[in-house]
Amino acid sequence: MTQYTRRQVLRTAGAAAGTAVVAGSLTNPLTAGAVDSPPGSDTNPLKLWYTQPATEWLQALAIGNGRLGAMVYGGTATEQLQLNEDSIWAGGPHQYDDPVGKDVLPEIRRLIAEEKYLDAQNLADEHFMGLPHEQMQYQPVGYLSLAFPGVDATAVTAYRRELDLTTAITSVSYEHAGVRYTREVFVSHPAQVLVMRLTASQRGALTFDATYSTEQAATPAAYDKQTLALNGISGDAEGLTGSVKFCALLRAFTDGGSTTVADGKLSVAGADEVTLLFSVGTSYRNYLDVGADQVARAVAPLAAVGRPAYGALRHQHVDDYQRLFGRLDLDLGTSDSIALPTDQRVTAFRNGGDPQLAALYYQFGRYLLISSSRTPGQPANLQGIWSYKMLPEWQSKFTLNINAEMNYWPAGPANLAECWDPLFQMIGELSESGARTAAAMYDAPGWVAHHNTDGWRGTAPVDFAYYGVWPTGGAWLSLLFWERYEYTGDLEMLRKYYPVLRGSVEFFLDQLQTDAKTGWLVTSPSHSPEVKHHDYDNVGVSMCAGPTMDTEILHDLFKVFGQATAVLGVDSAMAAAAADARSKLAPIQIGYLGQIQEWLIDWEEAALETSRHVSHLWAVFPSDQVTPRSTPELADAARKSLELRGPAVTAGWSLAWKLNLRARLLEPDNAYKHLTQLLAPGRTAPNMFDLHPPFQIDGNFGGVSGITEMIMQSHSGEIALLPCLPTAFPTGSVRGMRARGGFDLEFSWSGGKLTKATIRSLLGNRLRLRTGAQVDVKSSIGPVAFARPEDGVVEFRTRRGVDYFIEVRP
């Protein structure tokens, strides 16, 4: 694949994504039926499985523990694992701010006010961008290869590889020369090591050489008689010297046979069984400090494990993983398609008849979030933790104008609140670097983050002014603290991060400008992310004041701040100032074509601009400022905006956002159409990774959220069951889904109608429940007094820890 920086992609392709070859189906339809199934195989619906090894990265299977990640190819003559550790970033600690910024900011604002948008954008490109203009890229460790001499791949039979989502273990099994070989691979979060177990049906049959390969400046060496090391340092970029030192250690434990480490390889000969442990340590302590001892960090988990008892190590891993994954079950119905390999099912999903693939996709997304976002570790980046390129597309950073936030849309409803922790830690760090950016470039209090950040927590504008001078990335992130509080009632978390929320509000209270024509408070400079409003001399211009997305985000920021201050009993005066500012924000407007107006001004030609971005519809989702019930005219305008924005197949993450939008607009047919477009070979790889293309993990997480919104919504003060259920899912059930207000849900349906539900109140909040049916309510402690404020809606008080039984009247 071609290597791209974000600037190169944007410079050469505008709104188009970087090109990537989409991997084809792994299963040859002419030979698939001839492949023998291994003994004991089954059609466990929560398994991804294949009848051939991976030959491309987008066919390999992803495993991870939040910090360590690997892509497992499942080869026979040669096994290959592509390896990542989430703190390996190019460059080093660096503050991107240009102190000249605050000197030119008044002039940029003056030019915008005078509608000299190109001049403002040019001036920002010259003096209001980060130094350097590009942020740093996420980088891989490299590859681990195991070569098995004497194995002829063409003579292998009964091959199967799979990823079991219930255990987070990928496995390979096959027969060769009368011997059955099996491998299991997982990344243990408790042990902080990757584990590979190799067995054979014949004694002494395991012989292989293990070697590293990498594009990093790294050298393999013997660490001890059973351990092979790879010592390296991250790459240089944009004039910044690579500074993250890393040490990778591969240690072998055998039953029978022998192990030697020499000449850059670890060799096992004539073993009965082998357990390999792989560990990586880096010198990255945090975004300001790369002084840790990477070797000591790599050795520590290996020393803690010692000589592994594989069964105990595996059990510990599965138990830890199941504590998160096992909270939620989803059944959307089944069909004979579950007997087909996963890649064939992805190809055929658009044809219908495979509802279980949607459930598998949902649970795969939950698996990916658990595997890429746990403490200790970084948040999930554009590719989670899985990236094989030294210079991945868009540097595989954290893009804050949609992608990083989309990664966490499932965290609340899919019952994975702990997965927010690495993101929240990053937001806290961004508030520190963002305070320096606010002071240096805006002469402002509080903190600000623009549209991208990296491992060094850059908060200044980057790339080009067309894309980068968007000041509300930190504001959007700050809203997530309240979102988590709504799901969990975790007051200590809210109190811990309240200063970060407050700092974002403080920045905007200081920096909002008064629009001379309307008197409304607006952001300036800004833009509607990655969408132009004019061409001047064939140059696209996005720079403006008061784009609709900013207004929508700040509407919620000021609202949430007021709610948080009330809960915590602090800052009442500042809350009043925020409420006053909120009342002066521009309203959401309907443009001349009947669309949600994207800018303060109803620019006619710009309203017809096609793009994968739908930023002006933020008020529909993830917010709830626009809903079909509370604001029907604006909901119709949102539908018009989706129509005008153009075909919905331009990017996987864009399809996922539109899926969520259609669900919130209560359009089951359109929502399901977007799901079929998302779950298709052009947007879902054979290994079920989302494709922009190229691979971006946000579409996987956005898809999970979209399926949730089809079957359950919790916003605007109520919970709705089956609010946008497509006809493709007539029968199903869910257990363990979470709703705002602190409710744990279990419910089922048949013929597209609710059959029963059990709701556990975790916080004792009042519940308004929309079922679309006439229901009665009982509880585990006795009768329930409830009201019927409208048809299909019940409302009642709840008590913490009590189960409420929703019974549908015949």
Image (cartoon, grey):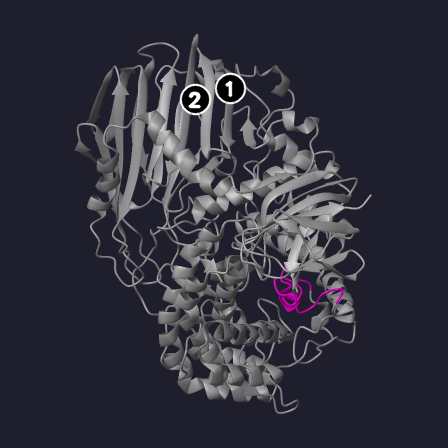
Would residue 386 be visible to someone looking at this image?
no
Q: Farthest residue toward the front?
A: 782
User: In x, y percent, where is residue 550?
Assistant: 58, 74
Say which residue label 2 marks. 76
Q: Is residue 753 left or right of residue 541?
A: right
Q: Farthest residue toward the bottom?
A: 516
N-term-proximal mark, 2 vs 1: 2
User: In x, y percent, where is residue 480?
Assistant: 50, 63
Q: Element under label 1?
A: strand
Marks 2 and 1, how far apart at CA: 9 Å
Say which residue label 1 marks. 159
User: In x, y percent, where is residue 176?
Assistant: 44, 12
Q: Quadrant of the C terminus?
A: top right
User: Which region is colored magenta?
Assistant: 610-629
Would residue 715 be visible to someone looking at this image?
yes
Looking at numbered disc 1 in the image, what kind of residue is underneath it?
Tyr
Q: Main secondary structure of the magenta part?
A: loop
Nearest the viewer among 427 and 137 is 427
Residue 455: which disc?
none
Examine the rendered structure and indicate whether residue 127 appears above or below residue 782: below
Q: Residues within 10 Å of mark 2 (few under 14, many from 20)?
A: many
* Residues marked 2 and 1 touching at CB (< 8 Å): yes
Q: Residue at x 58, y 60 (%)?
A: 741
Q: Is residue 57 left or right of residue 602?
A: left
Looking at numbered disc 2 in the image, what kind of residue is underneath it?
Thr
Q: Residue at x 78, y 66 (%)?
A: 636
Q: Residue at x 63, y 18 (%)?
A: 33
Nearest the viewer among 19 and 704 is 704
